[in-house]
Amino acid sequence: MKRIFLIAAILCSSLMVLQSCSPKGAASTNVSRGNITGNWVLNDITFDGVPQSAVKSLFDEGSYTCFIGSTWSLTNSGNGTYTLPGGGKCVAKTQSIFWSASPKDQTFQFKKIFEGDKAKNVTSGYRLLLSSGNGDNLVIKSPVEYGTSPAYIVLKFTKAVK
């Protein structure tokens, strides 16, 4: 009888160790380019590891609040735009971008393209982490420097209804 309890305890312990070592949410973080292509609305912005009051701007456009309600159009060719809705202290604006996604390292990159620019000549941009994505929802994290631990501005999108 002692032997059965000992074997059961060892099995339970082994399962707990294996469970704790398995990647969390691996299925939800496997985002491909096809999951990203399309039209998106940025519905919510939250903060992970950084207080909201410490974030003064997003993508060098001014307040992060100006991005809430913005629409992002991402074509399969890599061309795209984001449109800020304006209102309050925010200016309505459409910005051309060139974007790419790397399923291998789960990143989303984009660079702003201004009139007369060619994407291949623009050397600065933004590299974000693809947190999760499926047909109707997309979560992208923008890393920010704050303290010594990783901190992120979390962008939550929903697929735009056509």
Image (cartoon, helix red, strand yellow):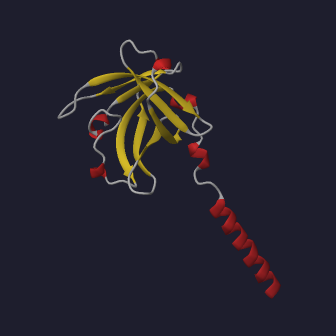
Q: How many marks?
A: 0
x%, y% of residue 37?
A: 51, 26
The residue at the far left in this view is: 88
x%, y% of residue 133?
A: 52, 39
Horizontal side of 29 relative to 58 (left or right) equals right
The residue at the far top in this view is: 116
x%, y% of residue 106?
A: 57, 39
Query: In the rendered view, would you say 120 is above or below 106?
Result: above
x%, y% of residue 43?
A: 35, 38
Q: Nearer the viewer, residue 50 or 85?
A: 50
Horizontal side of 40 relative to 87 (left or right) equals right
The residue at the far bottom in this view is: 2
- Write the residue at 50% across / 19% down: 120
Q: Is residue 116 visible?
A: yes
Q: Is residue 1 visible?
A: no
Q: In what quadrant of the picture does the C terminus appear?
A: top left
Query: In the rendered view, would you say 78 is above or below 144?
Result: above
- Write the residue at 35% across / 23% down: 95
Q: Nearer the viewer, residue 3 or 90?
A: 90
Q: Nearer the viewer, residue 142 or 68?
A: 142
Horizontal side of 107 relative to 83 (left or right) equals right
Q: Quadrant of residue 93?
A: top left
- Write the residue at 61% across / 48% down: 26
- Write the residue at 20% across / 31% down: 87
Q: Quadrant of residue 57?
A: top left
Query: In the rendered view, would you say 159 is above or below 13?
Result: above
Horizontal side of 128 relative to 45 (left or right) equals right
Q: In what quadrant of the picture does the N terminus appear?
A: bottom right
